[in-house]
Image (cartoon, helix red, strand yellow):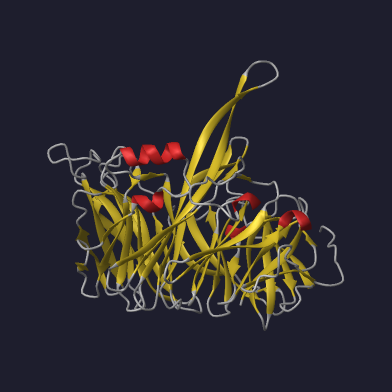
Amino acid sequence: MKKIFLITACLLVTIAYGQSKKFQFKMGTEYGLPKKAADLSFFGNEKDGIVNLSLKKDELYITRFNPKNLVQTGEKVIELSDATKNMNSETVVDFNQKYFWLRSDWDKNTQKEILYATSIDVKNGKISDQNQKIIETPKLAGDAVMTGLYRYKKVNKFDFNFDADHSKLLVSYRVAPESKNDKTSFDKIGIHVFDENLQKIWGNEFTMPYTEARMDNADFSIDAKGNAYLLAKVYDSETRKEIDKATGNPGYHLEVFKFTKDNKQVIHATVSVDAFFIRESTLIENALHDMIIACTYSKNAKNKGTEGVFLGILNTEGKVDGYLKGHYKFPLSELEKFESARKRRKMEKKDDYEIPNLTVRDVVVEKDGSVFLACEEYYIMQKSRMDGNGRFTYYTTYHYEDILATKIDASGNFQWIKKIPKRQEGSRGRGTMGFKLISDATGYYFLYLDNLKNLRLAEDETPAKHVDGLGGQVFVSKLDNNGNISKELVFNTREEDIMIFPSEFSKINDKQFIGRAKLKKTLFKPLLITVN
């Protein structure tokens, strides 16, 4: 076990450019982990403590901290003797301060996929002795990843979703198809619903009414009654044509599939997309227990851009309402901000400009029925450069750029859209890039690393670049409920000589978020953010 290095007291971070009234940062004692140990999650509470869960192969590391001063109070290394090389850590579930670690494994002897639930005792920094098998099923579909030379394993086999009240958990999966021919194979979807003690309420497997060639799964969701839902893109034919040549309209539509405890038949409702092309779609329950459909859309199937967002509501009677009034086009006047003069001229020349590379990151359905969407410009580029021998080498860069935030009120009226400029670039995946959304009754806060030059950026200026791994300043951009923007510099990582990863922070209560600051390859500190 790697030695843990301690410092005698917790460090309360001093903000270099003035103390933030809204945010406080607190760092704790150093702790060490082996090389390539994966950070699974930070979680806990003010009463019992804070725990960091990390994993390397078949060893689980539980590091506990005092919740008030973040001084380390213990560490345990637990060998998972029953784990195979196919084991995957899936997620950590927090049910009102009841914590469960979910992991999956493939049993070659029984030819079964197994999902285990392990209860975590935060107060004492340990796990339960018994692993609870909560799902056992035939081989599942997933994504293959390389684990070594000529070795790979499947990941992303399960999806996890909570209802709006966070009292029920939906675990869903897709059984591996028997036939490789998508035109003759029908998806079999597993649906399992659990209560806050991770006891199964109900579960079943459903055969979908369309072949794999005609159907793409988009998003799963669950309501307060334990009914499960799937939002899917259904093509008009197995040729999977995006455009109907006869009409020029989309060659597909959206459908919402409903799965219930007492009915083995799949119930489904159609959402007409008319002449609009869907980019991304999300299904989420609101406070009134209606299912909200939130999508980005385009008028042009070929340019892969986004014109705006639209909303639909699947009510408790299984009908889709409000779809036709739910289209909200992004105004060009907002999209032009923080762009070069040349880019603005190009945008104005196009009759229907659509923003490229837009990805939906967060959808928040408020208690009053209003909907907030946070999107980010994200894309990957392949680049080349000449080495010392005159040969070209190729490398990949990842780009996390401007944020677009949209608010639509409970009556379905478009309130505002705001652009938050940033330009993050790196070559190692997400790393320190991206953002963390923190919301409360006063508005929405975007936590991210940025270049200091962007603190006071005029609307006719373009943002300076922040390079992943090279320090950076922690910015918070706030949008209040009326769409007013303010920006604040709250922390300088270069002064502390650390790296932080804003998008990976975990929410432990309504006011606090925790993640880790990286000092060296194997040395870290817990970092607690408190929202006042």
- On the picture, is 19 further left or further right than 283? right
Residue 351, image x, y percentages: 27, 41
Among all residues in the image, which is located at the extreme bottom?
Answer: 47
Among all residues in the image, which is located at the extreme top?
Answer: 390
- On the picture, is 247 further left or further right than 415? left
Could you tell me which residue is drawn at 53 percent across and 47 percent down? Answer: 400
302 and 496: which is toward the camera: 496
- On the picture, is 339 further left or further right than 391? left
Residue 18 sits in quarter: bottom right
Among all residues in the image, which is located at the extreme right?
Answer: 8
Residue 404 sits in quarter: bottom left
Residue 310, image x, y percentages: 29, 59
Give the total number of marks visible in the rendering.
Answer: 0
- On the picture, is 5 further left or further right than 241? right
51 and 452: which is toward the camera: 452
Residue 292, image x, y percentages: 31, 67
Residue 50 sits in quarter: bottom right
Any part of residue 477 in sight: yes
Among all residues in the image, which is located at the extreme left?
Answer: 246
Vertically, is 350 above or below 256? above
Could you tell me which residue is drawn at 76 percent across and 50 percent down? Answer: 521
Query: Which quadrant: the N terminus?
Result: bottom right
